[in-house]
Image (spheres, rainbow, N blue to C red):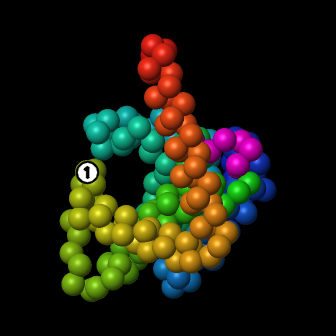
Amino acid sequence: MLIQVETNLVSPRLTKRHVRRVLRWVNKEDLKDLHAVRVIAERPNDREYAERPQYLSGFLYNGHYEFKTKDRNAQVVLYAGDVYFGVPKIFAGTSMATLKMARTLAHEIGHHVIATRGYIYKPSEKYRPWTGVNDPYEEAMVCAYASDVIDRMLGNWRYKFGKFLTRKLSSALYRAGLQEYSDGNY
């Protein structure tokens, strides 16, 4: 599979390493017919995304899956600015960043699995055809798929440590925010 990093937001070599580490935890059969994983700086100003209601995108979009067509192969596109949001540069090379990458990459691979196989866990799963609006059931299933990948990763001490770092950093930033708020620094 091709891994293309088209941004210098975080070192391209480091970003490739994070993607490769995540792909090791994904079932190889699920990656069949996935041509590439592309990492770009930010979400493009595409009309399709601009027309979407904001509540469907959320604050961070992180990436998307591009279906195979007659003109292009299937690929996952990740937005480095969103994926690495909240990871301090000093932790960019740690398993904390790999876990952040894993959440989005595994989610998008879940969409690929549905597009190629038709289901994630059981053939009885039924999804609505793409109409420009996300199917809530499909989103729930690909989130479950991503959680399964993360759970497998958390069986390894390296990723347990990354989760520990994430929680400690989050807690410290939360306390700092509360202090700023109580000091009247809004």
Quarter holding the C terminus?
top left
The answer to whether residue 9 is magenta is no
| Position of 84 relative to 54 (above/below) | below
| Position of 182 relative to 24 (above/below) | above
Between 119 and 150, the one nearer to me in the picture:
150
The amino acid at mark 1 is: Val
Quarter holding the N terminus?
bottom right
| Position of 168 relative to 107 (above/below) | above
Please state if 78 lies on the left or on the right of 112 as rendered: right
Of all residues, the one furthest to the top in this rendering is 184
Highlighted range, magenta: 85-92
Q: Residue at x 55, y 72 (%)?
A: 154
Q: Residue at x 30, y 44 (%)?
A: 56
| Whether residue 50 can be seen here | yes
Residue 98, image x and y in percent? 63, 60
Q: Secondary structure at mark 1?
A: loop
Res 128 quadrant in image: bottom left
Please state if 31 lies on the left or on the right of 24 as rendered: left
Q: Residue at x 49, y 29 (%)?
A: 177
Residue 159, image x and y in percent? 62, 67
| Whether residue 69 can be seen here | no
Can you identify the residue that label 1 sits on?
A: 133
Q: How many marks?
A: 1
Q: Residue at x 44, y 68 (%)?
A: 146
Please state if 168 lies on the left or on the right of 13 as rendered: left
The answer to whether residue 90 is magenta is yes
